[in-house]
Amino acid sequence: MAKLPVPVEKLTAQFGPTLNYSPVGGWQNRSEPEKLVKTHCCFCGQQCGIQLKVRGNRVIGFEPWEEFPFNRGKLCPKGVKRYLQDNHPDRLLAPMKRVEGTGFVPVSWDEALDTTVRELQRVQAQFGRDAVAMLSGVSLTNEKSYLVGKFARVALQTKELDYNGRLCMVSAGTGNKKAFGIDRAANSWADILEAKVILCAGTNVAECSPITTDYIWRARDRGAKLIMIDPRVTPMARTCDLHLPVRPGADSALLVGMLRVMIEQNLVDLAFIDKYTSGWEETRDSALAMPLEEASRISGVRVEDIVKAATMWGEAPTSFLLHARGIEHHTKGVDNVLACINLVLATGRLGRPGCGYATITGQGNGQGGREHGHKCDQLPGNRDIENPQHREYIAHVWGIPEEELPRKGHSAQEIMNLIHEGQIKALVSICFNPLVSLPDSNFTREALSRLEHYTAIDFFLNETAHHADIVLAGSLHEEEEGTSTSAEGRVIRIRKAVDPPGDARTDTSILLEMARRLGRGKYFDHFTDSEAIFNELRVASKGGTADYYGITYERIENEMGVFWPCPEIGHPGTPRLFETLKFHTPDGKAHFHPTPYRPSAEEPDEEYPVILTTGRVVSQYLSGTQTRRIGGLVDMCPEPYVEIHPTLAQRYGIRDGAMMRVESRRGAVVLKAKVVTTIRPDTIFIPYHWPGDLAANNLTNRALDPLSKIPEFKKSVVRIAPVEPAS
Amino acid sequence: MSERQFYIDPSRCIGCNACVAACAECDTHRGVSMIHLETIQRGDSVQTAPVICMHCDEPACAAVCPADAIKRTPDGVVQSSLKPRCIGCTNCVFACPFGVPKYDAAIDQMMKCDMCYDRTSIGKKPMCATVCPSRALMYGTPEEIAAQRHGTPINEFIFGGRTIRTKVNLMVPQGTKRLEVNPGTMIRKSDLLNQARVR
């Protein structure tokens, strides 16, 4: 019964988003803090150090943490205002159940948990264990991610577990594993400073990873050149040395074109390629098969600019390549990542100072979360759930027979598809708001309405949880101890600053209690605190590529973070991978892969002639569950808009600031036009953080990359029209 | 090592509003930011620029204040108007060549950036220069700036023939000595478009 109990307007009136502008008690009454808690920002993979001001079990403000080496006190506006998620009027203070016609009403924990367990067991008895799915998120700590992975597989005994990182770093992870056998930024950000050429492919660094701009600028101060590949002139592209305004979906054509030029101009390191890599011949031949004019025609980038970029990159003594969702959110996201890696491998600039490569992980614990928990095809330590030895080891750590460990399940979008088809009947979610973040929102809404049972664990009632039968009031980032792993691969400490308010409970205690009630308590009862979970994670990761065994809470605190892999207590950690040029692939070599261009799932046609690409704004985080409730952040960008080039706007009679309609095969939105020359004339852009009628994801396409299963958020096709104001 | 100074480099500004948000956290002007972020011409560029008080040697805001409410400290920080004196006339708002002072109707008083006197006086950096992700706002020594940055800091501005020196430095391309702003010689986008049409 996962239809809304009352109209959405009524739910919004009761559960927000309400805009919180001021600290508890108001600005005039804010007093001195009792303590400063050194922890990290909960928004984005940079995981900036921050100190939370605490008084009377309330977070009342922040103070920069200038000693933390990554950000040295720097914060974006989300970090500055993050404390306002505490003491928030929308905060869920007790478990609730859905009551038709009334909404959600508070119930006891016993009733909420009993109902959940009874319903899950009923569905599993009737339809099989895999008829229950769990969806999780990587704003959770490593401990919670690990616990969710174990909970779903050992307590729920379902294979259908996946997470919102599926919408984030999975193309990068898959590409990195294929090429290097390991899924982590190859370098800490310190190597950016020594690079002489920095290539950013599909990353709006300024808005999505703001502190990274300082690393890039410090390199530029030392003479580094900056190349930006982006359909838009983003704030960093505005001043860069070379901007390549690529047509959405054509990144691999551009990157292959660059490789071709580098081959023709002898700007490849054949000695390195010969000794440390495999797959070069096929990749070289594939690049040479693509005429440069063809690369230019497909990518929309001028031949001379492709040559210039290839020459700058090829000739650089040191370099750093950064990419993000712009190239990864495609049905060929993995290919795009591999095309980037090919450029790095062809020059041999890896594993030494100033020579680096990384994806910019977007989500708070996107890195650690995917290593240890809730990815449908992985076990802790970045192990493969279908590998017999890996299964045997983890089953041993968990104390279950190997044959009881579920096999590979489906990805997040596929789970939603199975819910829509009626194969999956019940859902448990934590820290994931798929109604806003998955593509094709109308489809997602329809799927949710078909669930027989849905329990949501969260601290605010997000738009997906509107469809829940039971809501379990969980905890914020600052309400539990733990660790997370930043985009650099640095494992850091998340500190508890306050207790959950009211009758809300920690996420950890909720999952442990559910495991007990599912009759599987004996596998979980030794988890007396977060550190006990981390210590089991250390053992579970031992011997995997993401080896945390040598990392302890004490070390993290003393050393301001430790970089994995760190296999022994005495091991210093590994800020820079591949220093010995030994890779984690079976043959020990880095692998080239040919990436011939193929079209996107949708290309413009007569009916839908305009390309839509979606992305973010600096003041919002993911689906906005937290940041759409913070007044100061919402004021910076109150609602989404459409960036459109003047020539395209003129063709359709769309004026700057006027409302326009955008329609795809799946849905429509009406938003304000922002007529700007800073975008390609064939492409419009909409930021995605909003729900309902404002959702960019009403338009986007559910097509997936065949390997990473990431949806194609960065390219769908639409038709546009002006909307005349009602007279 | 010299004393630390304030440097603004608009070329590095990413328009993130961290400075604006952080300024509002100050316990002296609770919830109200003393910084404004200017979007220069969004139709053609994503250029933004943070505007903080430049702390003039001879502040026009203080000179035009009929109530003598704006004071400059011995170390050159021009402060917000004094509450008992400010009459809310907004002369300062109109006089400032940099467009800094803002009149706050709720408290009937002019408030402006005082370079985080509460922080700098105890050896901390101003809040905005601490959080600024791209270090478009920087608080450091002239030696650090010379060693780290390409541009040149200037603190001399000529507005319609009148020279103004400031405590705060603006980073400009190398070789530039001062910035001259003359309304008669300003190039406007509309002028360029008209020229193009004539051609």
Image (tube, coloured by chain):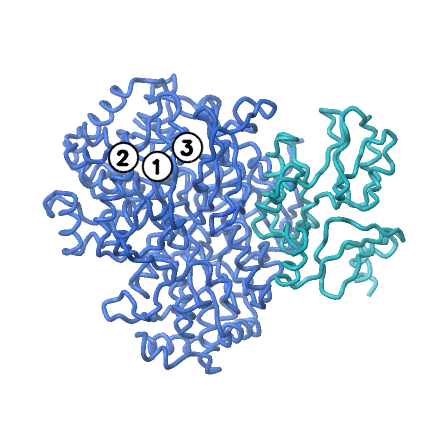
Chain colours: A blue, B cyan
Q: Which mark is residue A497?
A: 3
**Nearer to us in this view, B114 or A184:** B114
Q: Pointer 2: what residue?
A: A529
Q: Is residue A195 above or below residue A512?
A: below
Question: For numbered disc 3, what is the local secondary structure?
Answer: loop
Q: Amino acid at mark 1?
A: Glu
Q: Earlier in the sequence, mark 1 or mark 2?
A: 1
Q: Is B125 left, or right, of B169 in this rendering?
A: left
Label 2 marks which chain's residue?
A
The reply to whether label 3 and label 1 mark residues of one chain is: yes
Q: Earlier in the sequence, mark 3 or mark 1?
A: 1
CB within 8 Å, label 2 to label 3: no
Question: For numbered disc 1, what is the local secondary structure?
Answer: loop
Residue shown at the point (34%, 61%) measured from the top left? A176
Question: In this rendering, does residue A379 appear at all?
Answer: yes
Disc 2 residue crowd, few under 14, some 14–19, many 20+, Cα 10 Å:
some
Q: Pointer 1: what residue?
A: A481
